[in-house]
Image: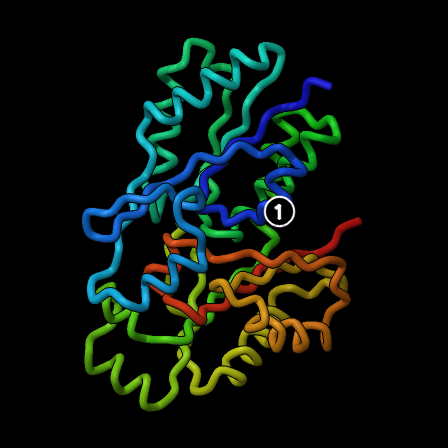
């Protein structure tokens, strides 16, 4: 079956087994610790990343793939699969220039009409789940138009929250001041973050105590996600066990169809640090 090929970036934080199962094509971003450069997910694993992040005074930086990187992948895929189209899904344009690079890369390809580029307006597995959904639709024989509609629908349905454990990384990134970070740490403040309709990360609330913050996330989810049965993904910073208390809280209120564990990569992890937990959930509509 000549189903569309799904392309995305390493920032989708898709588990390796799902990438392999659906043959999702990944373009890595680059990560810089000073002069040292690494391909995200290729040269540096999340475990190694968080270990190194804890030792540096200056946060690492990331670099998006160039238009030429996208053009090269698109051209290779179209040459290898002359009877197939490409659906390319990207990190929020509100957080990165990857979508713009991909769009320019598409325009550099002779058969650009065979490539569809989508701005997810989301980050990490907040759009990785839409990429996997697109890959499942493609494998089931859906057209490009049907995949586009499916991606748009699932992104409109999902709820997303990040729970930050350590304020020091928000301070290093200039999101909060030194005094606020020190006071927040003293008071055991746990910021809850999300992503708005423009694809930009924003603070939702600050709660004292990890358990109370988790309970607050569940409360907010119940207000917006009223379905009884849900699909769930939990993001962690190379520490899957940290998600278990959240999972148990959610099981008290929802019938969970399946659970995916996603490792939060460098783009989000640089600013939120180790100990961050992410919750992504969407209704089961079958």
Q: Picture coordinates of residue 128 (x, y %)?
A: 54, 46
Q: Nearer the viewer, residue 205 or 173?
A: 173
Numbered disc 1: secondary structure: helix
Q: Quadrant of residue 217?
A: bottom right
The residue sitting at the bottom extreme is 187
Question: Number of callouts in the render?
Answer: 1
Q: Position of residue 43 (x, y in %)?
A: 39, 44
The residue labelled by disc 1 is 154
Q: Is residue 157 above or below residue 55?
A: above
Q: Position of residue 138 (x, y in %)?
A: 67, 30
Q: Is residue 275 above or below residue 10?
A: below
Up-down: is 140 above or below 49? above
User: Percent x, y for residue 95?
Assistant: 34, 48
**In the image, what residue occupies the spot 45% across and 16% down?**
75
| Quarter of the N terminus within the rendering | top right
Give the residue at the far right of this rendering: 286
Decide if residue 246 is on the left or right side of residue 111.
right
How dense is the environment of label 1, judged by Cα within 10 Å: few (below 14), some, or many (20 and up)?
some
> Which residue: 25% across, 84% down?
182
Q: Would residue 66 be found to the left or right of residue 41 on screen?
A: left
Q: Is residue 209 above or below residue 1?
A: below
Q: Nearer the viewer, residue 232 or 30?
A: 30
Near-viewer residue (273 or 214): 273
Residue at point 71% right, 60% down?
A: 230
Q: Quadrant of residue 29?
A: top left
**Residue sitting at 48 percent across and 34 percent down?**
118
Color scheme of the displayed model: rainbow
């Amino acid at each position: 079956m000549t189903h569309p090929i799904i392309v995305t970036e390493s920032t989708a934080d898709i588990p390796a087994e799902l990438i392999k199962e659906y043959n999702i094509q990944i373009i890595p971003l680059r990560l810089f610790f000073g002069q040292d450069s690494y391909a995200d997910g290729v040269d540096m694993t999340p475990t190694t990343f968080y270990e190194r992040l804890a030792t540096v005074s200056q946060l690492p930086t990331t670099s998006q793939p160039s238009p030429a990187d996208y053009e090269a992948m698109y051209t290779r895929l179209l040459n290898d699969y002359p009877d197939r189209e490409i659906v390319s899904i990207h990190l929020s344009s509100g957080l990165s220039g990857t979508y713009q690079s991909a769009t320019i890369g598409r325009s550099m390809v002779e058969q650009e009409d065979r490539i569809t580029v989508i701005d997810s307006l989301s980050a990490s597995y907040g759009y990785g789940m839409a990429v996997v959904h697109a890959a499942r639709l493609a494998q089931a024989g859906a057209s490009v138009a049907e995949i586009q509609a499916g991606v748009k629908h699932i992104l409109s349905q999902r709820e997303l929250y990040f729970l930050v454990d350590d304020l020091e990384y928000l301070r290093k990134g200039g999101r909060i001041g030194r005094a606020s970070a020190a006071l927040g740490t003293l008071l055991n403040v746990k910021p809850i973050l999300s992503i708005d309709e423009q694809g930009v990360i924003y603070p939702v609330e600050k709660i004292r105590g990890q358990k109370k913050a988790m309970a607050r996330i569940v409360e907010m989810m119940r207000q917006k996600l009223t379905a009884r049965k849900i699909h769930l993904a939990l993001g962690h910073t190379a520490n899957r066990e940290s998600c278990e208390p959240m999972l148990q809280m959610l099981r008290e209120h929802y019938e969970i169809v399946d659970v995916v564990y996603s490792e939060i990569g460098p783009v989000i992890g640089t600013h939120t640090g180790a100990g961050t937990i992410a919750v992504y959930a969407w209704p089961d509509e079958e």
